[in-house]
Image: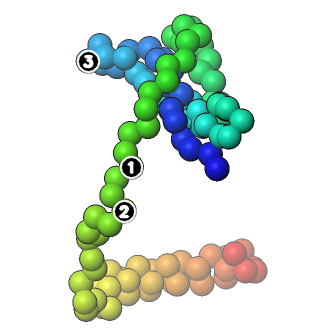
Amino acid sequence: MSKRRYDVVAIVGRRKDDKPNYVNCGVVIQTDKGFSMKLNSIPAGNEWNGWFQLFEPRPKPDAAAPQATAPAEFDDEIPFAHAWAIPVAGLFCALSQIGGGVV
């Protein structure tokens, strides 16, 4: 059984507010045989100094948090649908007659 122990993070440049820009690059897991590191990405460019930092994983947002629900009834009438359908159909017919075939 493996357990996620650390997030592998690199500092790549600075943000506009002069704070470090942290980029999550992978994870470190612990198994019965020891630790393993899985890198999903490696920063490139001059802004990365070659060092990774290990941080304890942040807790994930609660999956049981209430979600926004859709209203019980929807109004199926879309007021602009018919206004677009007629000109497009007319344009399609006009173009097919000019070109002599299906457009």
Q: Are marks 1 and 3 in contact (CB under 8 Å)?
A: no
Q: Residue 103, percent across and down? A: 69, 75
Q: Residues within 10 Å of mark 1 (few under 14, many from 20)?
A: few
Q: Left or right? Give the position of 16 relative to 96.
A: left
> Measuring 34% from the left and 53% from the top, which residue is drawn there?
61
Q: Residues within 10 Å of mark 3 (few under 14, many from 20)?
A: few
Q: Secondary structure at mark 1?
A: loop
Q: Residue 38, percent across and down? A: 66, 34
Question: How are the colours assigned in the image?
Answer: rainbow
Residue 40 visible? The answer is no
User: Mark 3 or 2 closer to N-term?
Assistant: 3
Q: Residue 35, percent across and down? A: 65, 31
Q: Is residue 25 or residue 43 the one in the foreground?
A: 25
Q: CA distance from mark 1 to mark 3?
A: 26 Å
> Measuring 62% from the left and 76% from the top, which residue is drawn there?
95
Q: Secondary structure at mark 3?
A: loop
Q: CA distance from mark 1 to mark 2?
A: 8 Å
User: Mark 1 or 3 closer to N-term?
Assistant: 3
Q: Secondary structure at mark 2?
A: loop
51 relative to 100, above or below: above
Q: Is residue 69 or residue 88 the one in the foreground?
A: 69
Q: Which residue is mark 1?
A: 60
67 relative to 76, above or below: above
Q: Which residue is mark 2?
A: 63
Which kind of residue does numbered mark 1 sit on? Lys
Name, please, the residue furthest toward the front. Answer: 32
43 relative to 73, above or below: above
Q: Which residue is mark 3?
A: 17
Q: CA distance from mark 3 to mark 2?
A: 32 Å
> Measuring 52% from the left and 84% from the top, which residue is drawn there?
89
> Measuring 43% from the left and 37% from the top, which residue is drawn there?
57
Picture quadrant where residue 68 is located:
bottom left
